[in-house]
């Protein structure tokens, strides 16, 4: 069976969930070969093997941390030439998409971004994408070269499938351009204790109807009761009620959780584009004609200041 390269997204060897999803999808089209760059390979190898990696190619160099994406592209290109894979899978983050695009240019291959599903086809992997503000789904495949595909988080449930996970060193030669952009400082992001927005299984978002930064506390309380991430519409972000890093929508982040709860969000097309692929959508809005209700699985017509606290208390009582 052909091998499939999987780029590992990790923090010092702690493998992030989107990579486990990629390993699960990779097994549909071949044998996963994980590419781990930077520190922590010894920690990551066991997890990668547990989720199906037959091999783990590792490389550690200061360039991966000290410079932007080009050194990682150099390494992934080296892995490509070492393995001759049937496909290359990369998490669909901002950095992941840049790495994938640069790699596709280097190896003369087609690229598919933001896939939400992957299956084997007679002429190569077939990717499903959600397009035109999530109004349509398309199936497509790369017709030139080795497919390079980025996959959105929460597109598949990670499934363990223990494999050998043999660790091998990857020889990497860095090109001239790899040190063109240096990282000069880093600032740790303040932790909220909540899951990462794009990777969360549950997201609770607030919009214009929240009517003030101080009122986002009730949205956060519901999110915390569910172990969810907190999102916000563009209207709420533009009003300064919540950070831009939490914006869901066409000009913010795209999410695809198992459950999406929209509180006080009208449902403009720009917002829908960022959350329409959520598996189950619940809306709370006092306007029965709000466009969001055309999209939802469950809708509550009511005042969010009454409904959301009651929902939070009900969740807490059931968990208790």
Image (tube, grey):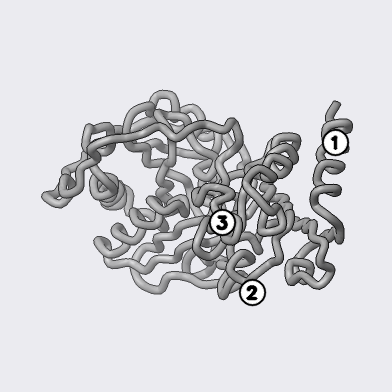
- Residue pictured at 33% horizontal, 28% vertical: 39
The secondary element bearing badge 1 is classed as: helix
Q: Nearer the viewer, mark 3 or mark 1?
A: 3
Which residue lies under the disc numbered 1? 313
Q: Nearer the viewer, mark 1 or mark 2?
A: 1
Task: Say which element carries label 3.
Answer: loop
Q: Earlier in the sequence, mark 1 or mark 2?
A: 2
Residue 120: give x, y in percent of width and height: 55, 62
Crowd tier of the residue under label 2, counting other residues whose Cα lies within 10 Å: few below 14, some 14–19, many 20 or above: few
Residue sitting nearer the eye, 129 or 243: 243
Q: Residue at x 88, y 33 (%)?
A: 318
Apparent side of residue 174 relative to residue 22 in the rendered image (left or right)? left
Residue 173 visible? The answer is yes
According to the image, label 3 marks what residue? 239
Question: Of marks 3 and 1, which one's residue comes earlier in the chain?
Answer: 3
Q: Which numbered disc flags the more N-terminal residue, 3 or 2?
A: 2
Q: Which residue is drawn at 29% across and 45% down?
A: 72
* Residue 297 position in % (x across, y down): 81, 61
Q: Is residue 277 above or below residue 10?
A: below
State whether residue 153 appears in this view. Answer: no
């Amino acid at each position: 069976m052909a091998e499939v390269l999987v780029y590992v997204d990790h923090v010092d060897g702690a493998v992030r969930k989107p990579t486990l999803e990629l390993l699960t999808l990779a097994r549909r089209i071949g044998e996963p070969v994980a590419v781990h760059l930077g520190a922590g390979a010894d920690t990551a190898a066991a997890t990668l093997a547990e989720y199906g990696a037959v091999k783990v190619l590792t490389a550690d160099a200061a360039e991966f941390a000290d410079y932007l994406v080009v050194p990682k592209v150099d390494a992934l290109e080296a892995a490509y030439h070492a393995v001759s894979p049937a496909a290359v899978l990369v998490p669909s983050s901002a950095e992941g998409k840049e790495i994938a695009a640069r790699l596709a240019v280097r190896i003369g291959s087609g690229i598919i971004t933001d896939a939400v599903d992957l299956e084997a086809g007679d002429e190569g992997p077939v990717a499903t994408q959600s397009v035109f503000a999530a109004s349509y789904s398309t199936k497509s495949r790369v017709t030139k070269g080795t497919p390079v595909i980025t996959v959105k988080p929460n597109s598949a449930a990670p499934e363990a499938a223990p494999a050998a996970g043999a660790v091998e060193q990857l020889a990497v030669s860095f090109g001239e351009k790899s040190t063109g952009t240096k990282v000069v400082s880093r600032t740790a992001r303040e932790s909220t204790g909540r899951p990462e927005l794009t990777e969360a299984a549950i997201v609770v978002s607030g919009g214009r109807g929240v009517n003030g930064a101080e009122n986002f506390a009730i949205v956060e309380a519901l999110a915390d009761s569910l172990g969810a991430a907190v999102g916000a519409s563009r209207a709420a972000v533009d009003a300064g009620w919540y950070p831009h890093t939490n914006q869901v929508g066409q000009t913010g982040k795209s999410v695809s959780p198992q459950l999406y709860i929209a509180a006080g969000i009208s449902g403009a097309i720009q917002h829908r584009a960022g959350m329409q692929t959520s598996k189950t959508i619940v809306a709370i809005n006092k306007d029965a004609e709000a466009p969001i209700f055309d999209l939802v699985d469950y809708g509550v017509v009511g005042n969010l200041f009454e409904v959301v606290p009651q929902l939070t208390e009900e969740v807490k009582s059931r968990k208790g």
